[in-house]
Image (tube, rainbow, N blue to C red):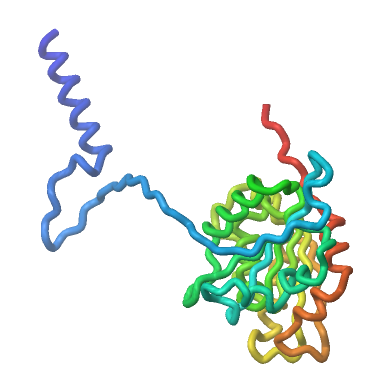
Amino acid sequence: MKTRYCWLLTLALYSAHQASPTLMAAEIPGRQAPRAMARTVQQTHRLHYLAFLPQEYGKEPGRQWPMILFLHGMGERGDNLQLVKRHGPPKLVESRPDFPFVVISPQCPLGTWWQTEPLLALLDEAIQKYEVDPQRVYLTGLSMGGFGTWSLALAAPERFAAIAPICGGGNPYPPVGFDPDRLAALRTLPIWVFHGAKDTIVNPSESERMVQGMRRYGCTVEYTVYPEAGHDAWTETYDNPRLFEWFLEHQRPLKASRN
């Protein structure tokens, strides 16, 4: 009996040794060896942003409002939020107190690009802090913000009811191993793309590649090209009330229960 017990103990220790790289011998110079790492990393994301609330906000208890997350271009980066008001919705609401959306306009720090994790953290904060309808969250951006719009939407399509990238681009396919629920959300995400035909800063082929990629993937995409516009495809886009009407025609369905 004792012999059998010792044999089982030896087998168990051998199996554990084989299964766990961390139990193997120390590294030998000139050779490589399998190892495993498990570490918890905590990050603090910090973004400054402009928040606009419609004139009627808070006057009707329980009312939830649609929200636009706006991503500016390269020229508005820095630590002066006044720069963010140069273009797009944050410029528009300066003279439109009745604009019927909550508008969240973050500022990208100087020398950096739009990053997914800080933007998703900001999105979570805005939905928690303000009376926002999570089924009616819309994403748009111009130039660098157009690239950011594509990137964020591909990373988390289930968070948005519709997107409108302007003179942007990116990788037109989601990463390998993308969650099936997110793939389904991407295929049902309404997309309206805008670009100037004479853009010499971001070639229109960038938007065309994204549009073609999304369509091959099964997405429904509208594509508007302004024949005489250069890089500034955003003024005409944001001055057109139809974009905001189009946003309001869409909402993200509630996630089905898995009970």
Whether 223 is drawn above or below 127: the answer is below
Above or below for 147 versus 62? below
Q: Residue at x 61, y 61 (%)?
A: 152
Q: In this view, does 89 lie to the left or right of 144?
A: right
Percent of width and height locating residue 19: 27, 37
Instruction: Residue 6: give x, y in percent of width and height.
Output: 13, 18
Number of labelled discs? 0
| Closest to the observer, 34 or 38 | 38
- The residue at the point 11 percent across, 56 percent down is 28
Tell me: 77 left or right of 160. Answer: left
Quadrant location, the N terminus:
top left
Q: Which residue is drawn at 32% across and 45% down?
A: 38
Quadrant assignment for the C terminus: top right
Please, is residue 93 above or below residue 207 in the view?
above
In front of the other: 85 or 185: 85
Residue 118, percent from left and from top: 53, 58
